[in-house]
Image (tube, helix red, strand yellow):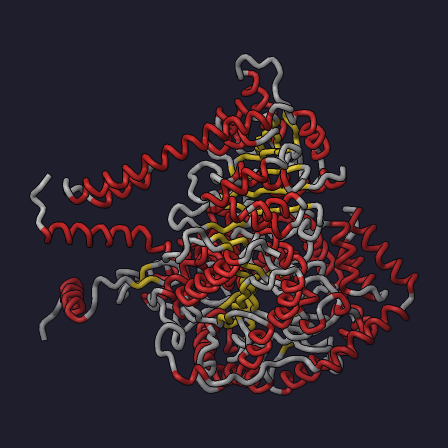
């Protein structure tokens, strides 16, 4: 695996793509590969972009790519889409809404399925970020559909967490998870060419002012992709907000998480055994037991 | 907890199988533990995407990860996409003669070192033009009326074969 | 013989029926409506005849939009064709006219649909599915010998309508007055392109929205015999919408266009008589008939009550029907002759104004001369031999058809309410709502075929050994003449007047920037000045945006 890691660090795109596959799959190979890759990390700025479906995240990211490219930055994107709860499969189509960057050698986009992590990011996302970082990409944009846990996750993995909202959610702005408001570094009101943008921005400001103990509120930026407005201020805000300590914080949390998930894995084996016994010995309904398992 | 005789036990097992089968019907048993990554795309000029969308849904329901593009991709764009997404299979949908440039796609894939990717074509390919595609390296051609099982099985097989070849390669080229 | 009460008779029938038929098998049509084995006066008694049906040529037009329907004048036989070079097209079009077609249509090459000229795309793709027409010379050649003042020409021509511009430039050249030109802009429905048939998608949504209204305004003033708006339900149904959804989306789209025009100050009675519709006619026979009858009745109400049209001509739902290629199979292709005939009968019983019958090999290739001839002959046989045209709306009054028409109307109105709730069609496609509905219906339809619930001969039942027979080779344009065509086009670009071209392109830019100018007028000017199709589209994309259609996977 060290050969692969070296090839990744040398910037070979095909090897990077293959490394991402290995890391996504997990297991011993992934752990070894990541360990080697970690030596090369620490330079990329990781920007998490989350928000409800229909907020225009992909198009906004497309615009961000353009603006960052104009600054000479090399940009990688991880576009995370939820997997089907029924099959575990996924249709990954976000990248096609990010505009015409396919042939730009300074842009690398990878579509990622959440692989069954309900409401959360793919377990592999931190490792994927490390790989992109090690491969020398200046900025890693991480796109996820906002849904509870992933919002908070994204804040842990990213140096800057951007929450994208959109006019027309109306009172539903309230529904934006309080958790994300707590951790977002920048709030964006996208599609601000639509009526109601000012109102949405105002509502967000009000909610932020209720955020306790913070003397400084995160900025609320209005963007519109068709008008190319607000994109530049968002980019400069990203640079300002990227915190020096962000990376370290992420790694620390990562270690805790790894330990937790290893523990959970053992636990669930026990659970499965117990479920089987409760069907065979206690005569419980299989469908009930199966559902209980699925719910875990 | 006793009281269970063998008949009860075998009944419980078969029940178990039945329920699991029901839950997993849509999963269609991918033969490998991680999903196959498939690119479903259209090159050339045609814009009819009903077929490619249905195929994408089939493969998702079979447990695979489908990178989906709108119509009108360029060949060089598809090559770079396949590279970045590290797909094992590319499915090209062609309803209005766009299959005529699929050999160009295979050539450019090979030039980019992606000659191990399996390429399948679905849609309308006249019999007289099948050889042109298979000679160029197309793995399968699915005509109108191909069933879900046929398509899913072929992607399973081709994808597993690609994965197998890749796992034996030390470091990708 | 004892007198039996109707209810006792009905009970006896129900009991007898239950002995012979499987009661558990629920039959649904494509729109999801449950179809019973029998309909009686309990389902439709005719009390509301005058309000719901009325007489042909009278509102609500359920029975047809003209008093005499096919007794007076049969439908227009309009075969959609397009292939090869303009010379190839011309040969085919003259042949079709000789065979009895009363109007023509033109399908441009896919490169044209993408807004590109022939010198910009991979050569093997040129002319395989449509004719390569990139400038006025090409159009002039394609329509050589076609009397522009008397033959109606339908152009498969999305925004910014370059084909019509080339037709007008040709008319100008031949000294034919614009008000003699008749026909239809078949692909003016940019919303359906955005949603369902991305094939024709050329300009951004807002850009297309503006150009369409400009096009309507221009034609109203300069080409009054032209139908500038054709709302294309066909795209929705081909992409997978159910027949009821299709009608709902189409009517919602038509409302959007009418309101856009009215917002520009055009009076509804000045535009609506030239609104036309374009639909798929599927093989779901009675459902199609009910779809169109219900659609006519809803449109009559919308135009009068909602849009405020006073002129009865504005209330008429004029439509072109194309037998659905989705129902055709590549397996046992000759079977498609029977399918097309069945679809065509449904279209005739639906009261269509103009019809295209598919060639049997359409699921495999561009039609050959033979298959194109059979497609036209199918219409001739139905019209001349089968006595289908003797009685107006012959299925009217059938308990089943009337009940189904009511049910389809209900379902159409339900879907229209969903669109209305979402803020109208423009907003509903912007958010992906419509795309999602179509995608789900398409998948459901395919799953019914996969599961054998819906049976398709030669595909999931009655498969035949003969399927392995080699098909005849498909139509491919002659390579040499296509290369010569492209070479001549390159020469044309080199030899034309640069200053004229510059002036044409500047005119396009100026019109695009100035809301008070008419973009389509500038397209006609540019076309006349020798600006090519690709150049016109590229210039307007630059000004009005392109973007991509929203595709919901």
- Residue C95 sits above or below residue C263 on the image: below
- Residue A294 in percent (x, y) is at 32, 41
- Residue C205 sits above or below residue A207 on the image: below
Q: Is residue A86 left or right of residue C536?
A: left
- Residue C412 in percent (x, y) is at 44, 54
* Residue drawn 53% across the image and 66% down it: B120
Q: Is residue C317 visible?
A: no
* Residue drawn 15% across the image and 53% down it: B10
Nearer to us in this view, A295 or C398: A295
* Quadrant assignment for the N terminus of chain C: bottom left
Nearer to us in this view, A184 or A243: A243
Q: Is residue B84 left or right of residue C140?
A: left
Numbered disc total:
0
Nearer to us in this view, C110 or A110: A110
* Residue drawn 79% across the image and 62% down it: C524
Q: Is residue C13 visible?
A: yes
- Residue C281 sits above or below residue C258 on the image: below
- Residue C35 in percent (x, y) is at 31, 63
- Residue C522 in percent (x, y) is at 80, 57
Q: Is residue C186 left or right of residue C35?
A: right
- Asked which quadrant contains residue C147, the reply is bottom right
* Residue drawn 42% across the image and 53% down it: B63
């Amino acid at each position: 695996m060290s050969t692969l890691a070296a090839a990744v660090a040398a910037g070979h795109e095909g090897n990077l793509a293959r490394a991402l596959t290995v890391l996504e799959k997990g297991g011993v190979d992934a752990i070894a590969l990541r360990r080697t890759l970690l030596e090369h990390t620490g330079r990329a700025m990781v920007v998490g972009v989350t928000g409800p479906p229909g907020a225009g995240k992909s198009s906004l990211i497309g615009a961000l790519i353009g603006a960052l490219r104009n600054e000479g930055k090399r940009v990688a994107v991880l576009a995370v889409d939820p997997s089907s709860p029924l099959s575990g499969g996924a249709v990954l189509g976000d990248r096609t809404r990010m505009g015409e960057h396919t042939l730009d050698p300074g842009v690398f986009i990878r579509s990622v399925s959440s692989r069954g992590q309900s409401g959360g990011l793919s377990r592999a996302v931190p490792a994927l970020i490390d790989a992109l970082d090690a491969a020398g990409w200046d900025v890693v944009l991480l796109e996820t559909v906002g849904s509870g846990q992933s919002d908070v996750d994204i804040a842990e993995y990213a140096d800057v967490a951007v929450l994208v909202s959109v006019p027309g959610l109306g009172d539903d702005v309230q529904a934006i998870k309080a958790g994300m408001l707590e951790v977002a570094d920048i709030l964006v009101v996208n599609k601000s060419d639509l009526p109601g943008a000012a109102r949405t921005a105002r509502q967000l400001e009000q909610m932020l002012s209720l955020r306790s103990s913070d003397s400084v509120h995160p900025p609320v930026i209005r963007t519109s992709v068709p008008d190319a407005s607000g994109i530049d201020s968002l980019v400069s805000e990203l640079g300002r907000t990227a915190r020096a300590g962000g990376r370290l914080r992420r790694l620390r949390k990562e270690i805790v998480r790894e330990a937790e998930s290893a523990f959970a894995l053992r636990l669930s084996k026990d659970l499965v055994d117990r479920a089987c016994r409760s069907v065979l010995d206690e005569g419980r309904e299989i469908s009930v037991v199966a559902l209980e398992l699925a719910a875990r | 907890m006793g009281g269970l005789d063998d008949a009860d036990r075998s009944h419980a097992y078969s029940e178990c199988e039945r329920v699991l089968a029901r839950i997993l019907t849509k999963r269609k048993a991918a033969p490998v533990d991680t999903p196959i990554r498939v690119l479903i795309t259209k090159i050339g000029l045609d814009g009819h995407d009903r077929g490619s969308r249905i195929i994408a849904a089939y493969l998702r329901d079979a447990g695979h990860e489908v990178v989906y593009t709108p119509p009108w991709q360029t060949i060089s764009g598809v090559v770079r996409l396949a590279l970045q997404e590290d797909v094992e299979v590319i499915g090209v949908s062609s309803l209005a003669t766009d299959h005529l440039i699929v050999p160009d796609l295979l050539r450019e894939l090979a030039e980019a070192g992606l000659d191990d990717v399996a390429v399948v074509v679905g849609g309308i390919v006249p019999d007289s033009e099948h050889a042109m595609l298979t000679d160029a390296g197309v793995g399968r051609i699915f005509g109108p009326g191909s069933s879900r099982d046929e398509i899913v099985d072929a992607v399973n097989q081709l994808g597993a074969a690609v994965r197998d070849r890749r796992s034996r390669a030390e470091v990708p080229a | 013989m004892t007198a039996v009460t109707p209810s006792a008779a009905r009970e006896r029938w129900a009991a007898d029926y239950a002995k012979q038929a499987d009661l558990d098998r629920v039959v649904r049509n494509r729109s999801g409506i449950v179809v019973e084995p029998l309909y009686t006066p309990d389902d439709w008694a005719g009390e509301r005849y005058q309000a719901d049906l009325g007489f042909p040529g009278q509102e609500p037009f359920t029975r047809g939009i003209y008093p005499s329907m096919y007794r007076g004048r049969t439908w227009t036989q309009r075969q959609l064709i397009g292939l090869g070079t303009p010379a190839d097209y011309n040969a085919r079009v003259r042949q079709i006219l000789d065979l009895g077609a009363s109007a023509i249509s033109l399908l441009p090459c896919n490169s044209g649909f993408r807004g590109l000229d022939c010198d910009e795309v991979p050569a093997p793709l040129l002319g395989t599915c449509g004719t390569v027409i990139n400038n006025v010379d090409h159009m002039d050649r394609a329509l050589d010998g076609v009397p522009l003042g008397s033959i109606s020409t339908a152009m498969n021509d999305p925004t910014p309508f370059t084909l019509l511009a080339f037709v007008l430039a040709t008319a100008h050249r031949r000294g034919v007055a614009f008000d003699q030109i008749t026909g239809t802009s078949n692909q003016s429905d940019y919303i359906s392109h955005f949603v369902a048939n991305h094939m024709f998608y050329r300009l951004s949504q807002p850009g297309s929205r503006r150009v369409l209204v400009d096009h309507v305004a221009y034609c109203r003033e300069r080409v009054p015999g032209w139908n500038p708006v054709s709302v294309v339900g066909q795209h929705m149904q081909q992409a997978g919408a159910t027949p009821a959804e299709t009608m709902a989306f189409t009517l919602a789209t038509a409302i959007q266009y009418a309101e856009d025009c009215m917002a520009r100050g055009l009076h509804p009675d000045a535009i609506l008589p030239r609104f036309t519709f374009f639909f798929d006619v599927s093989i779901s026979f009675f459902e199609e008939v009910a779809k169109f009858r219900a659609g006519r009745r809803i449109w009559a109400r919308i135009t009068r009550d909602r849009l405020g049209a006073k002129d009865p001509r504005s209330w008429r739902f004029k439509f072109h029907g194309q037998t659905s290629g989705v129902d055709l199979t590549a397996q046992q292709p000759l079977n498609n002759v029977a399918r097309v005939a069945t679809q065509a009968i449904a279209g005739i019983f639906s009261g269509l104004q103009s019809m295209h019958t598919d060639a049997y090999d359409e699921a495999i290739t561009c039609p050959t001369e033979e298959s194109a001839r059979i497609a036209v002959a199918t219409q001739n046989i139905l019209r001349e031999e089968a006595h289908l045209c003797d009685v107006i709306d012959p299925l009217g009054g059938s308990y089943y058809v009337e009940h189904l028409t009511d049910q389809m109307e209900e379902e159409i109105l339900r879907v229209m309410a969903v669109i209305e709730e979402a803020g109208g069609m423009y907003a509903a496609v912007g958010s992906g709502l419509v795309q999602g509905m179509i995608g789900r219906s398409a998948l459901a339809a395919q799953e019914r075929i996969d599961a054998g619930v819906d049976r398709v001969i030669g595909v999931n039942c009655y498969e035949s050994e003969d399927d392995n027979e080699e098909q005849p080779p498909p139509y491919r344009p002659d390579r040499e003449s296509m290369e010569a065509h492209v070479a001549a086009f390159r020469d044309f670009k080199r030899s034309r007047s640069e200053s004229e071209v510059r002036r044409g392109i500047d005119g396009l830019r100026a019109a695009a920037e100035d809301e008070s100018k008419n973009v389509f007028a500038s397209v006609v000017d540019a076309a006349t000045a020798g600006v090519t199709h690709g150049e016109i589209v590229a210039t307007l994309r630059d000004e009005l945006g392109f973007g991509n259609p929203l595709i919901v996977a």
